[in-house]
Image (cartoon, helix red, strand yellow):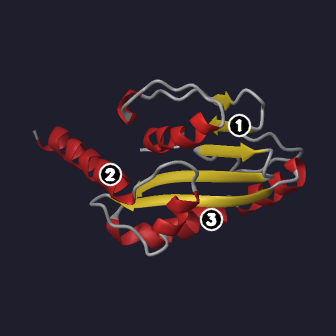
Amino acid sequence: MTECVHNCTSTYARKQGYNWTKKHWYEHVPKSVETNKGGKVTILWNQQVQTDRTIPNNKPDIIIRDNEKGICMLIDVAISGDRNVIKKEAEKILKYKELTIKIQRMWNSKTKVIPVIIGATGTISKSCRKYVSNIPGNHEVKELQKKAILGTAHILRKVLM
């Protein structure tokens, strides 16, 4: 699922000077650090943020740092039980609060946490569409829901057969 969100940012990344050739999200193997030609935008995947003091939650799934606009987005993706979608969303925002403050000071950029939480059967919170629309690139919530449901079906097929 994280690879899918990372690949969906390819439209935005191509505009910024990246060269991605993969057509499908499941073929995409993200590099840990992607930087465009001018160094204006950096996409970090599964990387720790080094700070001057220890912060326990310093490794979001995707970090998009746009130096030109002065924006940094911490994207954390999760598939949870259907009943816990709203609770998990709040957990993700609180989890990276300290890191958000630290990044704002270190990188001098406006930083926000974007939780992408989808239930195992595709349920989403009311605010999920708003969060997904904040991620640069071409994203459709229904595609993310579809991937979550297919992943759940795959797991169930393996367990039950």
Which amino acid, mark 1?
Thr
Q: Residue at the location (82% across, 54% down)?
A: 109
What percent of the width, then of the height, locates residue 120? 31, 58
Residue 40 shows in this picture:
yes
- Label 2 vs 3, first from the N-terminus: 3
Q: What element carries label 1?
A: strand
Q: Mark 2 is on which residue type?
A: Ala
Disc 1 target residue:
42
- 21 on left or right of 83: right
Q: Name the residue under label 2.
A: 148
Is residue 46 visible in the rendered image? The answer is: no
Q: Residue furthest left?
A: 161
Under circle 2, the secondary element is helix
> 132 and 12: which one is in front?
12
- Asked if 59 appears above or below 120 in the picture, the reply is above
How far is disc 2 from disc 3 in space, using C-alphas? 21 Å
- Counting residues from the start of the chain, the first of labels 1 and 2 encountered is 1
Task: Judge whether 97 appears above or below 31 on screen.
Answer: below
The mark closer to the camera, 1 or 2, is 1
Q: For mark 3, give the secondary structure.
A: helix
Q: Mark 3 points at which residue?
A: 93
Return the residue nearer the eye: 104 or 11.
Answer: 11
Q: In which quarter of the image is the N terminus?
A: top left
Residue located at (75% from left, 55% from top): 99
138 with respect to 100 (left or right): left
Query: Seen in the image, is 9 located left or right of residue 54?
Result: left
Tell me where residue 111 appears, x and y as whole percent: 75, 58
- Gap between marks 1 and 2, in whole Å? 27 Å
Residue 151: horizontal and vertical position, in percent? Answer: 28, 45
Q: Which amino acid does label 3 sit on?
A: Ile
Q: How crowded is mark 3: few (under 14 residues within 10 Å), some or many (20 or more)?
A: some
